[in-house]
Image: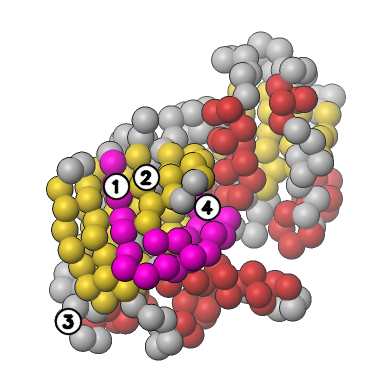
């Protein structure tokens, strides 16, 4: 069988339109495709239907992929199912991450990417993540975006981040990567990256390889006054690394970040507020 999992609320409520386009584009490749509302089902119900050799196409973006990797980690499924992404979400940082590697990004085979994924723990919660854990002003960016969405406003993450720079209360941070601890003052962001991109196009970890088994912790701080804002303003193009006095990227398998005051955190775009620490790691 061939299945198309879609969310009608995705892509700013245009999920049904995207579904029709997907069925038109790939219907001949996956004949007799059964479209399933992924926002209205328990994945366990679909998993019971899956048989060896089935194909599952995910219609959506980074948030939908986050749901998928967590479902696949927690719900038994046959091992020889082929998974694909038909990109249709408002955010597609995963597609940005792989699009210069010679892959067809109109229909992306997912099996190489969705099973060996890192986990994040914070407070009393733990979950798997696909692209990144944002912590600091990037988390606040998502909080502001949620407010704007509730008012029916269009979202530009770059503009939101820029507007927050002057009023964001920077924190002090203690970070531990594979047992080595460092202290940073006046920190803007401290995300852990499984991908190069997050927050709708921030090229935070230009050298990160999601298949390497390592993560990249990105610290942008203002210990040299004024340089942190310059670095953060350059992050969408990946040019923040030109400010070594304000930016440090540390690679490792187990990363812990502790802030001295609570701030917002997001996991692949899902927002959590008033968080003081997190741990990200490969199991």
Q: Residue at x 17, y 43 (%)?
A: 179
Would residue 132 be found to the left or right of residue 247 on screen? right
- Mark 1 → mark 4, Cα distance in angstroms: 17 Å
- Which comes before the other along the chain, label 3 or label 2? 3
Magenta-colored span? 254-276
Q: Is residue 164 above or below residue 104?
A: below
Q: Quadrant of the C terminus?
A: top left
Would you name the residue on which mark 2 appears? 280
- Mark 3 → mark 2, Cα distance in angstroms: 28 Å
Q: Is residue 182 above or below residue 126?
A: below
- Mark 4 → mark 3, Cα distance in angstroms: 30 Å
Q: Residues within 10 Å of mark 4 (few under 14, many from 20)?
A: many
For numbered disc 3, what is the local secondary structure? loop
Which colour assignment does the render follow? secondary structure
Pinpoint residue 54: horizontal percent, then vertical percent: 69, 18
Would you name the residue on which mark 4 appears? 268
Q: Residues within 10 Å of mark 3 (few under 14, many from 20)?
A: few
Q: Nearer the viewer, residue 182 or 14?
A: 182
Would you name the residue on which mark 3 appears? 224
Q: Mark 3, mark 1: which one is toward the viewer?
A: 1
Q: Mark 3, mark 2: which one is toward the viewer?
A: 2
Pinpoint residue 166: horizontal percent, then vertical percent: 40, 88
Marks 1 and 2 close (CB-CB < 8 Å)? yes
271 falls in the magenta region: yes
Pinpoint residue 40: horizontal percent, then vertical percent: 81, 41
Marks 3 and 2 close (CB-CB < 8 Å)? no
Magenta region, main secondary structure: strand
Would you name the residue on which mark 1 appears? 255
Q: Quadrant of the N terminus?
A: top right
Q: Nearer the viewer, residue 264 or 156?
A: 264
């Amino acid at each position: 069988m061939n299945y198309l999992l879609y969310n009608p609320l995705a892509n700013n409520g245009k999920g049904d339109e995207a579904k029709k386009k997907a069925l038109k584009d790939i219907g001949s490749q996956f004949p007799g495709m059964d479209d399933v509302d992924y926002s209205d089902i328990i994945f366990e119900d679909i998993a019971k239907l899956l048989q060896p050799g089935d194909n599952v196409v995910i219609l959506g973006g980074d948030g939908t992929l986050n749901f998928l990797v967590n479902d696949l980690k927690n719900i038994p499924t046959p091992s020889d199912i082929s998974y694909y992404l038909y990109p249709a979400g408002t955010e597609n940082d995963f597609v940005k991450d792989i699009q210069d590697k010679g892959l067809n990004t109109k229909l992306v085979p997912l099996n190489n990417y969705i099973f060996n994924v890192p986990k994040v723990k914070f407070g009393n919660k733990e979950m798997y993540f696909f692209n990144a854990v944002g912590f600091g002003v990037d988390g606040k960016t998502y909080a502001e975006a949620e407010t704007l969405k509730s008012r029916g406003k269009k979202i530009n993450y770059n503009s939101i981040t820029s507007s927050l720079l002057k009023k964001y209360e920077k924190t002090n941070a203690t970070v531990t990567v594979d047992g080595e601890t460092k202290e940073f003052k006046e920190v803007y962001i401290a995300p852990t990256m499984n991908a190069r991109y997050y927050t709708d196009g921030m090229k935070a970890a230009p050298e990160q390889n999601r298949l390497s088994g390592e993560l990249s912790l990105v610290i942008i701080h203002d210990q040299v006054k004024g340089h942190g804002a310059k670095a953060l303003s350059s992050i969408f193009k990946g040019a923040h690394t030109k400010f070594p006095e304000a930016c440090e990227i540390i690679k490792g398998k187990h990363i812990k970040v502790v802030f001295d005051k609570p701030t917002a955190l997001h996991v692949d775009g899902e927002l959590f507020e008033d968080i003081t620490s997190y741990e990200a790691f490969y199991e």
